C-alpha cells in the first residue's frame, strides 16, 4: 500500500492527504439520527409510574440542536385588521312599556296613550293580514311597546292567545310583522254514549264540548233530522282530537270518525285526508239535501195528509213539517238551487220557494224576514230567512215542504239523490283507514258495554 502511495505524483499525494483529513473530521461529529436515537434511548430508559428528581427531564436527555426556538411576533403583527372582523351593528337598547286594553279602547286610543303617532299606527295596520288581529283586541289584553332613546317605536309584541303571538319590528326604517304559532300536542279521545232523553243532554253528559256536539250533528245532518228523528236508546260514538299545550288541554280539534245509530240504522263517517267526511264505503256524507232547514228545535206538526188545521178546525192536508222555534231563528236552504218565489200571502205569510234542478222543489213559509229575491242562486246551508209567525198561524214556526216531480213528499223519509264517492285514486287508502277507525269505535263500544 505504501509503495503504491510513493509511486503517485506529488500533487496526487497531497490530494489524498486532504481527503483523509476531511473524512476524519466528519467522523468525529454524530449524525442527526444518531442524536435522536440517543435521546430516545435516554427517554426510554425512564420507567413508567416511577417518580424521578425534578432535575431529570427529556430536555436534559436531548441534544440542544433538537430544541426549536421561535421569535414571538409583535402585537401589531398578530392583531386582526378591520377588514378581517365581522361588523356587528349593536341593537339599540329599548325602553318597554305595557299597555292594558280598557273597555271602549281602540288602537288609536292605545297608541296615543303609549305616546306614538297616528302615522305610526297607520304604517303598522297597513302591513297586511298578520296585523289585522290588533283590530280585534279585547279588554284585559296587553300590548308591549319598545321605543328607542328618541322615543320612536322600534318593536311591538302582542300575545293574542296562548298559541298565537305577533311581533312587529322596525328594520331599516320600515316595520315588519311576524306571526308565530305554537304547535299543539294532539291526542285522540274516544267517547260512546246512549241517548236517554235527548241528543244534547247525552253529549253533555259524555263531557263533549259544544263545538264537538255541533260538529257531530253537522256530519250526520244529511241523514238524520236531529230535531225529529232522535229517539231514546239511540247511540253514538266518536273519535276526536284534543289539543294540549304544556300538558294542559286547551281545546278540541277535528272529529276523526263517528257512528250514529238512529232507530236501529247505523250511519258511519270517517274524516279523509282532504278534510271531508265519507261513509265507511267511501261515499260523501254531503248529499244534495239537508234533512232539516233548521237546527236543534222541536217539531210542532208533522207530515199528515189528514191533519186538522189548528185555526180553521177543518181537515186539510199538512204537506210538510212545522219546526217550532223562536222568532228570528235562522232558516237555511236545504239544497243548492234557484229562488223561483220570494213573496207574501195572507195564508203563507213571508215565504221562499227554491227549485233544485228539474225534479226537486222546497218551500219555506211563515218567515219573519226573507233574505233572498226571486231569481237568486243559493247554496246549500245558505241563510235565506228567519223563523216567524206571519200568515195564518198560531205561533212562531217554520213550515217546510219538499216536492219531487210536483208531488209532496215527507221531508223526513224521502229518498235523496246519492252522494259522490271519494276520488278513485284515494279510495284504497281511505278504505284501509276507515276499517281501522271503525274497529277502534267497535272496540270502545264493547268495553263500554262490558263495564255497564
Image (cartoon, rainbow, N blue to C red):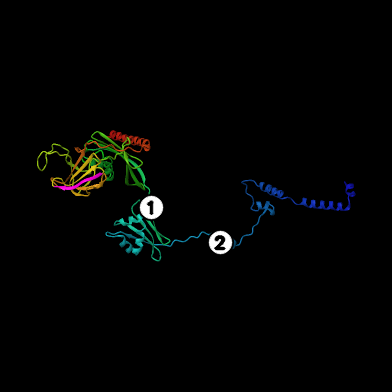
Image-based side of 285 in relation to 429, left or right? left
Mark seen at residue 332? none
Q: Main secondary structure of the magenta part?
A: strand
Q: Determine if residue 228 is in view.
A: no
Q: Is residue 233 magenta?
A: no
Residue at image location 60% in from the left, 61% down from the top: 77
Locate the C terminus by quadrant: top left
Q: CA distance from mark 2 to mark 1?
A: 41 Å
Q: Position of residue 243 (x, y in %)?
A: 34, 45
- The reply to whether residue 14 is in sight is yes
Q: Residue 180: which disc?
A: 1
Considering depth in this image, is 265 or 394 the residue closer to the camera? 394
Label tally: 2
**Going 78% across and 52% down the picture, which residue do you hit?**
25
Q: Would you say residue 342 sits in the magenta stretch?
A: yes
Foreground of the two, 278 or 365 = 365
Q: Secondary structure at mark 2?
A: loop
Up the image or down, 451 lies above or below 120; here it is above
- Image quadrant of residue 292? top left
The percent position of residue 363, horizontal first and vertical second, equals: 20, 43
The image position of residue 78, as x and y in percent, is 58, 60
Which residue range is magenta in the image?
Answer: 337-345
Mark closer to the chain start, 2 or 1: 2
Residue receiving disc 2: 81
Amino acid at each position: 500500500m505504501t509503495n503504491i502511495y510513493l509511486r503517485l505524483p506529488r500533487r496526487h499525494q497531497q490530494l489524498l492527504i486532504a481527503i483523509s483529513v476531511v473524512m476524519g473530521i466528519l467522523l468525529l461529529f454524530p449524525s442527526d439520527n444518531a442524536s435522536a436515537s440517543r435521546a430516545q434511548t435516554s427517554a426510554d430508559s425512564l420507567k413508567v409510574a416511577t417518580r424521578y428528581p425534578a432535575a431529570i427531564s427529556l430536555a436534559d436527555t436531548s441534544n440542544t440542536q433538537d430544541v426549536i426556538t421561535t421569535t414571538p411576533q409583535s402585537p401589531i403583527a398578530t392583531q386582526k385588521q378591520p377588514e378581517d372582523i365581522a361588523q356587528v351593528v349593536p341593537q339599540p337598547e329599548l325602553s318597554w312599556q305595557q299597555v292594558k286594553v280598557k273597555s271602549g279602547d281602540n288602537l288609536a286610543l292605545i297608541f296615543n296613550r303609549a305616546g306614538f303617532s297616528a302615522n305610526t299606527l297607520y304604517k303598522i295596520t297597513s302591513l297586511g293580514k298578520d296585523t289585522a288581529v290588533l283590530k280585534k283586541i279585547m279588554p284585559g289584553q296587553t300590548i308591549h311597546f319598545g321605543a328607542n332613546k328618541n322615543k320612536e317605536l322600534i318593536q311591538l309584541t302582542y300575545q293574542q292567545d296562548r298559541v298565537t303571538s305577533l311581533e312587529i319590528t322596525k328594520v331599516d326604517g320600515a316595520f315588519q310583522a311576524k306571526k308565530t304559532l305554537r304547535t299543539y300536542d294532539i291526542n285522540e279521545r274516544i267517547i260512546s254514549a246512549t241517548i236517554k232523553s235527548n241528543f244534547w243532554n247525552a253529549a253533555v253528559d259524555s263531557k263533549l264540548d259544544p263545538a264537538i256536539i255541533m260538529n257531530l250533528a253537522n256530519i250526520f245532518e244529511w241523514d238524520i233530522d236531529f230535531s225529529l228523528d232522535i229517539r231514546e236508546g239511540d247511540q253514538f260514538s266518536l273519535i276526536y282530537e284534543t289539543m294540549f299545550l304544556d300538558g294542559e288541554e286547551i281545546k278540541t280539534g277535528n272529529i276523526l270518525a263517528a257512528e250514529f245509530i238512529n232507530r236501529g240504522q247505523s250511519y258511519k263517517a270517517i274524516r279523509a285526508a282532504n278534510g271531508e267526511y265519507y261513509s265507511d264505503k267511501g261515499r260523501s256524507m254531503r248529499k244534495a239535501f239537508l234533512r232539516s232547514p233548521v237546527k236543534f228545535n222541536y217539531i210542532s206538526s208533522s207530515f199528515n195528509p189528514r191533519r186538522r188545521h189548528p185555526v180553521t178546525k177543518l181537515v186539510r192536508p199538512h204537506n210538510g213539517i212545522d219546526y217550532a222555534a223562536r222568532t228570528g231563528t235562522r232558516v237555511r236552504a236545504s239544497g243548492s238551487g234557484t229562488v223561483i218565489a220570494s213573496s207574501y200571502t195572507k195564508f203563507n205569510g213571508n215565504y221562499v220557494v227554491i227549485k233544485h234542478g228539474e225534479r226537486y222543489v222546497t218551500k219555506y213559509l211563515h218567515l219573519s224576514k226573507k233574505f233572498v229575491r226571486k231569481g237568486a242562486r243559493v247554496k246549500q246551508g245558505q241563510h235565506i230567512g228567519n223563523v216567524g209567525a206571519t200568515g195564518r198561524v198560531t205561533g212562531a214556526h217554520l213550515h217546510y215542504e219538499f216536492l219531487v216531480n210536483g208531488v209532496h213528499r215527507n221531508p223526513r223519509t224521502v229518498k235523496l239523490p246519492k252522494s259522490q264517492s271519494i276520488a278513485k285514486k284515494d279510495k284504497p287508502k281511505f278504505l284501509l283507514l276507515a276499517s281501522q277507525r271503525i274497529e277502534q269505535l267497535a272496540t270502545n263500544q264493547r268495553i263500554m258495554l262490558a263495564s255497564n
